[in-house]
Amino acid sequence: MLRGIADFAMQGRWQAGVAAALLSAIAMMLPPLNYLASGVIALTTLRMGPGEGAKVVTATLVVFMLLAWLLLGQLWVAGLILLTSWLPVFLATLALGYTRSLATALLASSGLGIVTVLLLHLLVPDLTGWWRGMIEPFMASLSEQPGWQLGQDETAQMTDNLAAMMTGLIAAGVSFNAVIGLLIGRAWQSQLFEPGAFGSEFRELQLGRPAAIVTAVLMGLTLTPLSDSLTLLADCLPVMLVAFGIQGLAIVHAIVKLREKSKAWLVTMYVLLVLMLPQMVMMLATLGVLDQWFNFRKRSQVE
């Protein structure tokens, strides 16, 4: 099925636009399909060049606007997905195409997430209050459900915690979509035209010490009272955790390959990611940061 999507998208810009738009529309009910839509844009941009990639994004927008008008009667949804999904993955793919560096492309995706943080802080003076106003009606409705077990004070505390985290989570979501779409597109390109190339690139991923230092500083900041006053910096941490979480995944894949371990190790890791996402992301990101100094892959090879 996935190979079929890639083959169909490579037939032309309108075929790619239809594929990406349909996947994005279905993603409103099955969100993970949005990553495949981003993968279509990444694949066509990598293979056909930036000019044709931009036309695919335009075709996707046109087709999706038609679907949004017919199904929802709302055209603004297309603009929202353009800004948070299709455009970020297109820009990240340009970084990969021009630099031929997967690491640079991932850091560019992080840059897009940080830009999202900056824009939100510039446009909304009281971000926490803004998010709280959006979350409170949902939490009030949720607290009225029969199975809800938290009291009024606990519900209010949860609302405040979510409001404080939302900016970073939204920015991380933009970055994550760009990263996953980019990786899917590159994997498709490798499968169709360079078998085996993506696996080697991914296992060798190295984001570099400067980005690792920034991430380590942001991690340390969140453990101090300063994080309450330096919210802009704190909101950048989830974005960097996405990048170094991917770095951690690359390290685990590489070690499993080098040591010829069973793929059950990888399956276990991904199951744990689903079951304990926050904890696993933090663990993988920490592994990715430390790898910039300890080079775990080289140590596994030597031993």
Image (cartoon, rainbow, N blue to C red):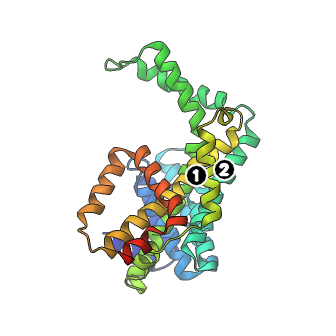
Q: Which residue is mark 2?
A: 116
Kindly report the distance in space between the C-alpha atoms of the residues bearing marks 1 and 2: 10 Å
Relative to residue 6, is residue 82 drawn left or right?
A: right
Q: Could you tell me which quadrant the C terminus lies in? A: bottom left
On the image, the x and y values in percent for residue 192 come to 39, 82
Is residue 81 in view from this perspective? no
Query: In the rendering, at what x and y percent does residue 87 appear?
Result: 61, 61
Query: Which residue is identified by label 1?
Result: 239
Q: In this orientation, does residue 248 appear?
A: yes
Residue at image point 30% right, 73% down: 259
Q: Which mark is residue 62?
A: none
Q: Residue at x 55, y 82 (%)?
A: 48
Q: Secondary structure at mark 2?
A: helix
Which residue: 69% across, 42% down? 232
Q: Answer yes or no: do the residues labelled 1 and 2 have beta carbons within 8 Å?
A: yes
User: Would residue 63 appear left or right of 19 to someone viewing this image?
Assistant: right
